[in-house]
Image: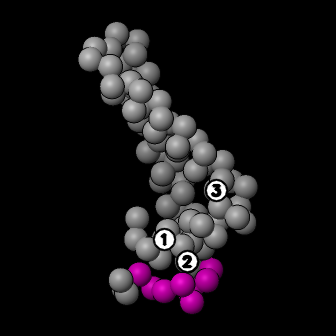
Amino acid sequence: MEKRDEAIAKILMKESEEFRREMEAHQRYERILEELNRRPHLTPDEEMERKKIQKLKLAGKDRMARMILAYRKAHPETGSGDAP
């Protein structure tokens, strides 16, 4: 994530309950995936669960990215995306 987007994410964490929920879910999914990935072997059910969690995590990341983009469009003073 770019520094500008990180700054927006911090703002959204304070201002948006929806963004906070998405971030908390994203972090929870990350912890679950880390635990599953530490295991040397997964059962078929665990492998299905891992794939499901990966999809949920990605979908949440996409929703957060859309919220960041919407914030950036609503607040052009945060930059256009061309600056580092």
Q: Quadrant of the N terminus?
A: bottom left
Would you say 84 lies left or right of 80 here? left
Disc 3 and disc 1: Cα gap in Å?
A: 13 Å
Residue placed at 64% from the left, 65% from the top? 12
Q: Secondary structure at mark 3?
A: helix
Q: Which mark is residue 19?
A: 3
* Residue with the mark numbered 1: 5
Q: Which span is picked out in magenta?
A: 74-81
Tell me if label 2 and label 1 are in contact, CB under 8 Å.
Answer: yes
Q: Which mark is residue 22?
A: none
* Neighbour tally class for label 1: few under 14, some 14-19, many 20 plus, Cα within 10 Å: some
- In primary-sequence order, the first of circles 3 and 1 is 1
Disc 2 and disc 3: Cα gap in Å?
A: 14 Å
The tally of labels here is: 3
Question: Which amino acid, mark 1?
Answer: Asp
Relative height, residue 68 to residue 45 (above, below): below
Residue placed at 34% from the left, 11% from the top? 44
Q: Secondary structure at mark 1?
A: helix
* Residue with the mark numbered 2: 72
Q: Nearer the viewer, residue 75 or 6?
A: 6
The spot of residue 71 in percent (x, y) is 60, 73
Disc 2 and disc 1: Cα gap in Å?
A: 9 Å
Question: Which amino acid, mark 3?
Answer: Phe
Q: Quadrant of the C terminus?
A: bottom left
